[in-house]
Image (tube, rainbow, N blue to C red):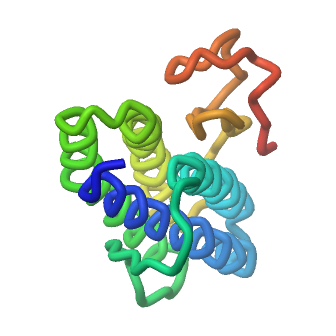
Amino acid sequence: MRKMTEQHLINAFGGESQANMRYLHFANQAEKEKFSNVARLFRAVSHAEYIHAGDHYRELKHLDGGFVANSMAAFGPGDSKKNLKLAILGETFEIEEMYPVYIEVAKFQGEKGAQRSFEWSYGTEKMHKQLYEKALDSVNSGKDVKLGPVQVCEVCGYTMEGEAPDKCPLCGASRDKFIAFK
């Protein structure tokens, strides 16, 4: 694997892993504040980030040793309002800066597996941002977000509200590959 794409995979693994943990902590805070649907959303997205990290990690199976992961991570947890703002900040960074560059470099270097992994994450992060913005609007009003089942594709991490589709719009996985957070 070409070194630049390899480092991007390492960095993306680090960022997705941190998001997974951060969102679990944010879920616990939301529960304390009686925002059970916000907590459920954080747990669903945390699971999607776990899937993204796993996709990136599997592309690095050729490595053997310790490597430094440089990734943008939002720090400074607080109440649910602040945590949702931090989550939106992180998702926005991935959408506007990180994944578009990683995708283009992987494409340029002919690293198809890495490109696919980055594209799946990129496509999903847009949904995460939209769901977090919806939750923040509610929390800003002092209310829990109204939220149907949150579905996460176990193959690519695609996240959506509502019933699982027959096929994942991102990776094409069948309906039975979705896990529902209700």
Give the residue drawn at x 68%, y 66%: 35
**In front: 171, or 130?**
171
- Residue 109 in sight in this render: yes
Task: State the image quarter where residue 172 is shown.
Answer: top right
**Left or right relative to 18: residue 154:** right
Q: Give the answer, above or below, for where 68 lies relative to 107.
A: below
**x 52%, y 73%: residue:** 18
Q: Quadrant of residue 67?
A: bottom left
Q: Residue at x 50, y 87 (%)?
A: 78
152 over 39 or under it: above or below:
above
In front: 32, or 61?
61
Q: Position of residue 9 (x, y in %)?
A: 40, 56
Name the quadrant of the C terminus: top right
Total numbered badges shown on the rendered structure: 0
118 on left or right of 149: left
Q: Measured along the vertical axis of the image, is residue 94 above or below residue 30? A: above
- Residue 145 visible in the shown view: no
Compared across the picture, whether 108 is left or right of 117 comes to left
Residue at image point 79% right, 36% down: 179
Rendered location of residue 2, percent (x, y):
29, 50
Residue 122 percent location from the top left of the image: 37, 41
Q: Quadrant of residue 3?
A: bottom left
Of all residues shown, which one is farthest toward the top?
A: 166
